[in-house]
Amino acid sequence: MAISPVIPVYNRTNLSFERGEGAYLYTPEGERYLDFLSGIAVNSLGHCHPHLVQTLKDQSEKLWHVSNIFSIEPLTRLSKRLVENSFADSVFFCNSGAEAVECGLKAIRKYFDENDKPEKHRVITFDGAFHGRTFGAIAATGTPKVLEGFEPRLPGFDKVAINIEAVKAAITHETAAILIEPVQGEGGIKPIPTEFLQELRKICDEQDLLLFFDEVQCGNGRAAKLFAYQHFDVEPDILATAKGLGGGFPIGACLMKEKVAETLKTGSHGTTFGGNPLATAVGNAVLDILLEEGFMQKVSDIAGNLRDKLESLQNKFPTIVDEVRGLGLLMGIKLRPEFENTKMVEKLRENKLLVNAAGDNVVRIIPPLIIEESHVEEALEIIEKTFGEML
Ligand SMILES: *Cc1c(COP(=O)(O)O)cnc(C)c1O
């Protein structure tokens, strides 16, 4: 048998880690790597944050799982806190980003069905978007690659360019919603212009559509606000999040305005594990830190510092760097076409800096939110050294 016992859907390296602490990962041989990938925006507070470790230990000695037919205290508390700190009135918990997106997509259908407009069922999505790997999510995703071999694509999605005229032209009497990542992650760390998001809100209000933000990657403090949309003075009707919310423990959440949430009646949606006591206890511990007075300001300051340094690197290596872009600690270096991002990521890894490749030839830089100036300096030294070796 030639196949590995693990289904080979990932491009895995042989590198493995035994433990992590803050912004560092250690191999079994004790070699140290600076982690500016954070499990792809998951380990938002670094590895083994003491408050998260303690919370998980305490909860694991009390209660692991009960069915959602019972009240779950950490779940109730986490939903209240998300509601208090966002546009939302109500939250559904699940276990991953794709599930949070699916919940939002189902809520859109249910909302219009309950409002006697079942013909409104189509969702407008965008080029370069990524929404996950379930059937619904791949149909919504903007890159053809995720659909390869899995067609026919589920109906009900209209993909357009990030252009207001294109959005307007795509709207018909069947259109129900617009789904967008306020900062495209997998597509290449592209912040969507504020005016564009504001214009989408206006269109949704005028044409009776729901606005659905996918903040699976850019939410939970990643963009130096609890949610990225809070930068733009635009509120969605639905927001999906996951990745950083559990700091490494699997959890997803779909946040909604009351008018949408109230249409999801008893029995209309559900999941066995969603809102599990371990996951929601850790989610609360993550929020304890994200909501601490001054924490977001600190993230914003260090993000500014990282951005300044990356931009000065662009001046120093204009033949390598095409553009530095992003929001908060969701940053990308777009390389010139002569340099391949996947190759650069490998070279950076050889020099003990962990980052990864996103779309559009971008090297994605997503450090834990707890980094200090010394980490930024260390990362920049490695990047500078690596760029030097590539010339
Ligand atoms: C990662 C991601 C998803 C999918 O999340 P999973 O937990 O992998 O299912 C969806 N949307 C965005 C924007 C993402 O970055």
Image (cartoon, rainbow, N blue to C red):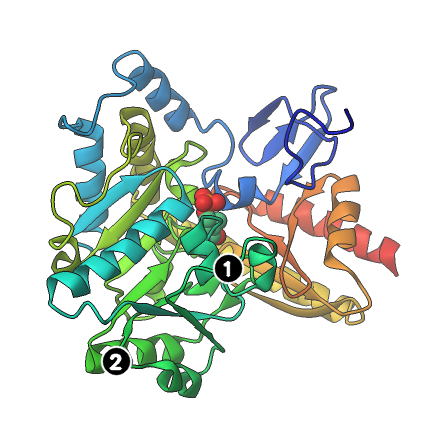
Relative to 115, 21 lies left or right: right
Front tag of 1 and 2 = 1
Look at the picture and state if 191 lies above or below 274: below
Which residue is label 1 attached to?
152
Tell me if mark 2 has few (under 14), some (14-19) or many (20+) residues whose alpha carbon lies within 10 angstroms of its own: few
Q: Nearer the viewer, residue 101 or 223?
A: 101
Tell me if mark 1 has few (under 14), some (14-19) or many (20+) residues whose alpha carbon lies within 10 angstroms of its own: few
Look at the picture and state if 287 lies above or below 365: above
Numbered mark located on residue 188 in the image: none
Which quarter of the figure has residue 315? Answer: bottom right
- Residue at (20% x, 41% y) in the render: 79
- Residue at (78% x, 28% y) in the render: 2
* Residue 179 visible in this rendered orientation of the protein: yes
**CB under 8 Å between discs 1 and 2:** no
Q: Nearer the viewer, residue 273 or 336?
A: 273
Which residue is label 2 attached to?
173
* Secondary structure found at label 2: loop
Residue 174 pos. (x, y %): 28, 75
For this orientation, the residue located farthest to the front is: 152
> Label 1 CB, ligand 1: below 8 Å?
no
Amino acid bearing label 2 = His
Q: Nearer the viewer, residue 153 or 83?
A: 153
Residue 26 pos. (x, y %): 66, 26
Amino acid bearing label 1 = Pro
Residue 211 pos. (x, y %): 28, 68
Relative to 49, 349 lies left or right: right
Alpha carbons under labels 1 and 2: distance apart: 24 Å
* Secondary structure found at label 1: loop
